[in-house]
Image (spheres, coloured by chain):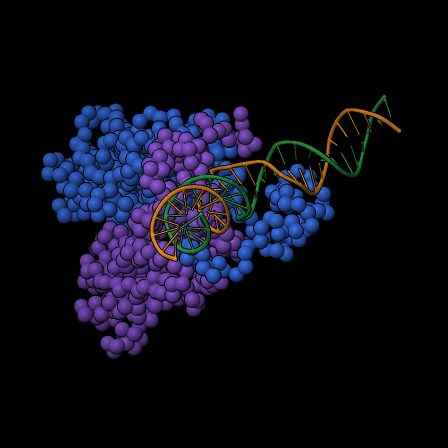
Chain colours: A purple, B blue, C green, D orange
Amino acid sequence: MTTASGRVPVGERLPTLEDVAKVAGVSRATVSRVINGIRNVDPQLHELVWNAVGETGYIPNRLARSLVTRRTGTVTLVVSDSEAHDDDPFMGRFFADPYFGRVVGGLMSVLRQAGVQLALQIIGTDEGRTRLVGDLRHGQADGVIVLSLPAHDPLPGMLTDAGVPAVMIGRPADPVPINYVDLANDTGASLAADHLLGRGCQLVGMISGPADVPASNDRITGFRRSMARHGHAWVPLVSGNFTQESGEDAMAELLKANPAIDGVFVANDLMALGALGALRDAGRRVPDEVAVVGFDDSSAAVAARPALTTIRHPLEDMAAEAARLLLCRIDDATMRISSVIYEPTLVRRQSA
Amino acid sequence: MTTASGRVPVGERLPTLEDVAKVAGVSRATVSRVINGIRNVDPQLHELVWNAVGETGYIPNRLARSLVTRRTGTVTLVVSDSEAHDDDPFMGRFFADPYFGRVVGGLMSVLRQAGVQLALQIIGTDEGRTRLVGDLRHGQADGVIVLSLPAHDPLPGMLTDAGVPAVMIGRPADPVPINYVDLANDTGASLAADHLLGRGCQLVGMISGPADVPASNDRITGFRRSMARHGHAWVPLVSGNFTQESGEDAMAELLKANPAIDGVFVANDLMALGALGALRDAGRRVPDEVAVVGFDDSSAAVAARPALTTIRHPLEDMAAEAARLLLCRIDDATMRISSVIYEPTLVRRQSA
DNA sequence: ACCTGCTTGGAGAGCGCTCTCCAAAGTGTT
DNA sequence: AACACTTTGGAGAGCGCTCTCCAAGCAGGT
């Protein structure tokens, strides 16, 4: 026998509640009650039912259960793909970056224990966004974690409007009433500025990320403010796009415009790696002639030579907190919107 | 109004097939047929129905559909956690490693286009395995991709027995009739041996991974065989556990036992990075005094100084192929078991 | 004896969809 | 005009589960 879909049933039909009920000699409802631990059921029946469950090898069908309870035990991780080009370079870059994996690891550490599944969705087009929100309203998932959205993505607003439990990692670019966890990016940048000036740098520049991403923007403002506070009203700044290559170019540009530069704060480790390469090419010794501070404390920071002094980003903890927040929100729809901001720390290595 | 679960319904009830049918003035069955493009439906009715869909803003409920079709449009990625210790260092390591992200990226590139979701499951205990297989038999997902299992995990056999469509990335340690995608690890190791000897190395050692993992084991045998073919019957070998730290230790050990060593093949890039550190500490210049070849061509290889010569592992392509294979198997249950082996290539950079 | 109040198990109506019937209508053949 | 055959839409039975009723049973108080 073959079904229309071409799928051949394996072995006999799986036991259902009905089958267990028959074996136990009770009604379907009673079995359901026992299994879900609802109401007081006579201890004798209780045992009878569990024996029948063992005998039949019954496993509840999560799909059927979800259909009526409107709960799936699944949370969707949404990442955006709207920056992708024809040959898909963005996604390749994104997933290969440990950033993604660290977030997943952090989320899973919490979700596992709660017995919640993680699903992954990439949204690109407007249509994708609409379908996603539609599916979510149908209870396709109990909630979403939203990660790494481009500057003015409408998704956060759509989720809020649809009443879907959602938590963002990194605050939304536009003000939207939505839960989020974030890093005090400005404080991190301040830490870098203080450290560079503290070790005696006279002319400190910055290599930033794209200015329309909130996280990146905060790093710029935080750095500038701290520099200004120490009397450096103006800071040479070149922006890149978070890739190693762009860091290399940016450093070259910075060096050309400011030959006397002796310190640089780079907005992520990958670009810092590029900067290190450019400095080597220019014959500048790090940290003696030019000190470099990165951001993220990714594995690349340890791998770099000299190892990068960088700003530690507790991404796993943040993701775990996002998951906790989401689970709370799912259980309690009346929860008020909240945000959690993590404080970064400076990790001192060799580059500064 | 608040439901028992604490979830407040947002707005009005979502439109169902029934609602669309009412608006279009046809039966539920007809709407279903139109939406799924099944059978010839009168073009007039066809249009009528689509208008009604637009008017009501109808979105099919995937859960309800799955319940009857036994198809979920979801594939589960299974990773193992049985090596985890108390404070969960394994998972942290695993997810932070670009390996995981690259696999996800490769899978998604295929699954997205097929409109298939990816779910993530971590299995640790025996109970977890049993529940997973049970859920899968219930059609919780249409199939699974199995990744990075410890040496003698029983999961592949369980999946085969349950008749769940499955594809492994990396062949199973025990012979089990299951689809898999793998890399010709032995060929890759040969490439490394040939390259090191070709550049004139006299005493070449190896830093391997754990010997009970098939991929790791193949790299050892491939390397040894190729070395033997060139007249080097014996190869100094120290094994690590794929972490940077273990690579550093292994290199130190290798140097101590074989001071004249002038070439080393390291079974992954992360350990190679550690080896580079140990060599620097020992005052050996790379590649002039000691040549180093890594494995994986991960982002760490480019980041390293000197940049790593390494064996390229087309992981994204392999994962994509695994996804394609799985989708085929899902559509055609009679598909015979197949495997696809990828050929690695040597990427020449500075370290050798 | 009757009514009240409480616990406990069963019956059955859905959740939203698909898909197998079956009837009605249309087409062509003898 | 009678028959067989094909096309097309509707009725309705589920998929496997939860959960709201409701009835039965059993205390205790009048």
Q: Which x, y percent locates residue B8?
A: 46, 59
Tell me which residue sits at (18%, 47%) in the image: B277
Q: Position of residue A72 (x, y in %)?
A: 43, 48
| Quadrant assignment for the C terminus of chain A | bottom left
The answer to which of A295 and B36 lies nearer the viewer is B36
Q: Indicate the quadrant where residue B185 lies.
A: top left
Image quadrant where residue A47 sits:
top left
Query: Which one is in front, A39 or B32?
Result: A39
Q: Is residue A166 left or right of residue D3?
A: left
- Position of A12 with respect to A220 (left or right) is right
Please say if B59 is above or below B317. Answer: below
- Residue drawn at (23%, 25%), measured in percent from left and top? B228
In this rendered view, identify the residue nearer to me: A320 or D5: D5
Q: Locate residue A150, reporting x and y percent.
A: 44, 60
Residue at 28% of width from left, 30% of height from top? B152
Count of numbered marks:
0
Q: Is residue D24 left or right of residue B204?
A: right
**Camera-side residue: A231 or A54?**
A54
Residue B66 seen anywhere in this rendered image of the structure: yes
Residue B262: x %, y % from top left: 18, 37
Above or below — where is A166 with respect to A59?
below
